[in-house]
Image (spheres, rainbow, N blue to C red):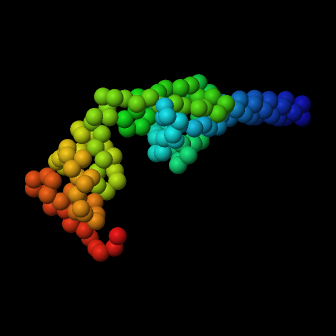
Amino acid sequence: MERLNLRFCRTFLVFLLGLFVSVGAFAQKISVTGVVKDEAGLAVIGGSVYIKGTTTGVITDVDGKFSLSANKGDILVFSYVGFVTQEVPASEEPLNIILREDAEMLEEVVVLGYGAQTRKQDLSASVGIVDNTDELAIRPVTSTEGMLQGQLPGVTITSNGGDP
């Protein structure tokens, strides 16, 4: 009987030890929140926030806010096209991140007609530049398509429908 009690006590102590160790491991996770803005104080919409060395990350919302779960000591990476990437240690305090413009990278950014942004090296289509913007502003046209029509050789602009 005494041997059975001793065995039960050992098993129970091992169970308690495992429980305390696992509780300590869960206590390492923290909730990281904050906001990402540019130097002008405007929210960075759709900026990437991820934990360095992992695939865990989030995208900033329309107010530049983000929230993700990380371990203490993790490094958060903040990036957006046309801005310098920043690395900041994870903190329980709300983070206020200010991204600086990357002048070299801004020259490589291309905004496509359907609203996407990409770098020139990642683009699989040709790129044309319309330089005479002053002349375009005084053209008597009723739409953007009409304004751009005939400005680039080989480019034909069509509208999918009659809706404005």
Which residue ends up furthest to the bottom in the rendered image? 162
Provide residue 163's location: percent of width, then percent of height: 34, 73
Provide residue 87's location: percent of width, then percent of height: 49, 26
- Say which quadrant the C terminus sits in: bottom left
- Name the residue at 89% across, 31% down: 2
Provide residue 108's location: percent of width, then percent of height: 27, 36
Which residue ends up furthest to the left in the rendered image? 154
- Say which quadrant the N terminus sits in: top right
Tell me if I can see residue 14 in this picture: no
Establish if 67 lies above or below 20.
Answer: below
- Name the residue at 62% across, 38% down: 33
Q: Observer-nearest residue: 156 or 77?
A: 156
**Where, by quadrant of the figure, is residue 17 drawn?**
top right
Q: Observer-nearest residue: 86 or 43?
A: 43
Q: Observer-nearest residue: 27 or 42?
A: 42
- Name the residue at 87% across, 33% down: 5
Establish if 73 lies above or below 147.
Answer: above
Q: How many marks?
A: 0
Asked whether, in this view, residue 33 is left or right of residue 132, the answer is right
Tell me if I can see residue 109 in this picture: yes
Provide residue 115's location: percent of width, then percent of height: 34, 53
- Name the residue at 51% across, 40% down: 42
Asked whether, in this view, residue 153 is left or right of residue 113, the answer is left
Q: Observer-nearest residue: 121 or 143?
A: 143
